[in-house]
Amino acid sequence: MPILLPAFVLGGTGFILGILIFVVSKYFHVEEDHRIDDIEGMLPKYNCGACGYAGCRDMAQGLLAKQAKVEQCKPIKTEAKIALMKHLDELFKSELELKKQ
Ligand code: SF4
């Protein structure tokens, strides 16, 4: 019987904190921009920092914000660079068309 009290206290605390974490995660959920994932997927993913950014994801955010240029990525291969430039071009063109409407 004396062992049941700590079990209930710990179990109850865990249950209450679990509910709290669930509620907080629902209300403070931040939707990620899938365009960053797409751009990051086209970068070499070496996370070397040669571009001046902390890593490829940071560089992808810079490219999307038009603060970085693809040429800043030193190890990217020519074909990948061209494909990424085309992708960004299409992305920015479609954004422009959406703004016009
Ligand atoms: S230089 Fe290229 S590979 Fe290196 S972190 Fe920057 S984007 Fe990634």
Image: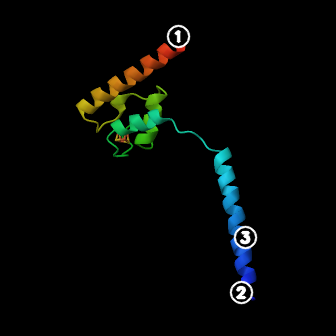
Residue farthest to the top?
100
Three-letter amino acid code of the residue under disc 1: Lys
Do the numbered discs 2 and 3 sit on residues whose CB atoms are within 8 Å? no
Find disc 3 in the rendering and name its residue: 12
Kindly state the secondary structure of the residue where label 1 is placed.
helix
Residue 52 visible in the snapshot = no
User: Where 88 falls versus 31 (above or below)?
Assistant: above
- Residue at image position (68%, 45%) is 27
- Residue at image position (65%, 54%) is 22
On residue 3, the disc is 2
Q: Position of residue 36 (x, y in %)?
A: 45, 35
> Callout 2 environment at 10 Å: few (<14), some (14 to 19), or many (20+)?
few
- Asked if the residue at label 1 sits under 8 Å from ligand 1, the reply is no
Real-space Cα separation, disc 1 to disc 3, in angstroms: 55 Å
* Quarter placement of the N terminus: bottom right
Q: Position of residue 67 (x, y in %)?
A: 47, 27
Residue farthest to the bottom?
1
On residue 100, the disc is 1
Kindly state the secondary structure of the residue where label 2 is placed.
loop
Mark closest to the chain's N terminus, 2 or 3: 2
User: How is the structure coloured here?
Assistant: rainbow
Three-letter amino acid code of the residue under disc 3: Gly
- Residue at image position (64%, 50%) is 25
Mark closest to the chain's N terminus, 1 or 2: 2
Real-space Cα separation, disc 1 to disc 2, in angstroms: 69 Å
* Quarter placement of the C terminus: top right
> Callout 1 environment at 10 Å: few (<14), some (14 to 19), or many (20+)?
few
